[in-house]
Image (cartoon, rainbow, N blue to C red):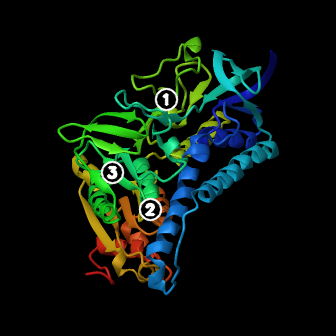
Amino acid sequence: MKTVRHELVVLGGGPAGYVAAIRAAQLGIDVACIDENDRFGGTCLRVGCIPSKALLESSHLYEEAQHRFAEHGLKIDGVQLDLDAMMARKKKIVDALTGGIDMLFKKKGVTPYRGRGRFRDVESIQVEGQDNVLIQADRILICSGSRPSKLGFVEEDGDRIGNSTTALSFPDVPERLVVIGGGYIGLEMSSVWNRLGSKVIVLEALDHIMPGIDGELAQMAHRIFKKQGMDIRTKTFVESAKRDGDECVVAIKDAEPIRCDRVLLSTGRTPATDDLGLEAIGLETDRRGFIPVNAEFETSADHVYAIGDCIGGAMLAHKAMEEGIVCVERIAGVKSHMNYDVIPAIVYTHPEIAMVGKTEEQLKEEGIEYNKGVCPFGANGRARTLGEFEGRVKILADVETDRVLGVHILGARAGDLIAEAASAMEFGASSEDIARTCHAHPTLSEAVHEAALAVDSRAIHTI
């Protein structure tokens, strides 16, 4: 087996890994990146964020053409679904973006290795697969990511009963789809197949959907999703799910079992830290499988670092990317910081849900006094012209300092609007700063402006 050496080896080519590798190369570090898949990009680009958003967009347009175009004076008869073409478009987007990483690696000087990487000791990784090589390094950065969580009583077969990856490639539209889990991944995939014609039943054990989202917005979203045709059942405990021929049977505690065509298990994600050879370097994970690190992303093993989903916290691609940049900059001696209080999160349903900072529930629990400003999208001219006037913007600001503590948006293009809020919070802005900033008219961003005005009870366009 060939032996090579690099200054830094990145184990994992997802958002954390490939971004860290590129930034390291920019800083003049001789860096390599290992991934066991044919394409770099990790779950996000290959079987997560990007393909799911492609299907969300396509299914949304299909539903619009069926039910909303007529409002605009556009009469289209006989709209038909070509699922194969929709899936082909998704694949084309994934191929373009994953192929782009190969191009960036070549341009920036990152050495790629394809194969399963395992520690042999604190200074070397053995790669087995497409490339078979022993890589020695001064430093090693673990970016192994995460995978969908499993439940022992759900008998996944990767066909009729599967996870979010399975649900991205159903060969046909299931007549009846049961989704176990009412978090953001489950609701996004529920939206896709509901729009394409499935009867979707969402089963959530908690008394509310989307744990972690602002409670008021979660309740509003629940009502909107039910109006869209989803059958959402909270406080519902699944006892088992198994295949029965070409059907599935989902057993429910204190209720009749549900028969359906397919089951999607969507109950969160778990760190992918097994089979990395961590025992060879004496590195232990915590009870949930996460790798403990200090503020510098250093593990307990000398010269070994870890970032992204495998260390816990918000399992979001952009959080992992930011950690990748900060980690390698610190390795290179560049002063860099990571602000975990300002990491936006987005649910790409329709309407979208976006948040950054604290929720009302968190502020109350922490005993922090706050003022609240709200602007419903119905008061926004641009939202009206788009026909997208469900939802609201909510801004929470400290009573004493007026500093923005949290922003929560349910509505059209919330995922884009939240960027202004995140920027404002990163600079320590007050609600007054946002209110004093002139926003173009007519735009959806005016809803953020109006909510900022409402914090001080001086909203113009709302009561």
Q: Quadrant of the C terminus?
A: bottom left
Q: Are marks 1 and 2 in contact (CB under 8 Å)?
A: no
SS type, badge 3: strand
SS type, badge 2: helix
Q: Is residue 121 above or below residue 154?
A: above
In three-dimensional space, the C-alpha distance between marks 1 and 3, rounded to whole angstroms, equals 42 Å
Residue type marked 2? Arg
The residue at 50%/81% (across/down) is 440
Q: Is residue 162 left or right of residue 229?
A: right
Q: Is residue 77 above or below residue 118?
A: below
- The answer, for residue 347, to whether it is visible in the render is no
Residue type marked 3? Ile
Q: Is residue 418 left or right of residue 144?
A: left
Residue type marked 1? Asn
Of residue 463 and residue 191, the one placed in the foreground of this image is 191
Whole-percent x and y of residue 424?
Answer: 46, 62
Mark 2 vs mark 3: which is more N-terminal?
2
Whole-percent x and y of residue 402?
Answer: 33, 64
Of residue 116 and residue 197, the one placed in the foreground of this image is 197
Q: Is residue 93 left or right of residue 156?
A: right
Mark 1 vs mark 3: which is more N-terminal?
3
Q: Which residue is mark 3?
A: 201
Q: Is residue 281 left or right of residue 368?
A: right
Mark 2 neighbour density, 10 Å: few (under 14) some (14–19) many (20 or more): many
Q: Which residue is mark 2?
A: 195
The residue at 19%/41% (across/down) is 255
Whole-percent x and y of residue 333?
Answer: 66, 36
Of residue 3 and residue 269, the one placed in the foreground of this image is 269
Mark 1 neighbour density, 10 Å: few (under 14) some (14–19) many (20 or more): few
In three-dimensional space, the C-alpha distance between marks 2 and 3, rounded to whole angstroms, equals 13 Å
The residue most toward the front is 245
Q: Which residue is mark 1?
A: 294
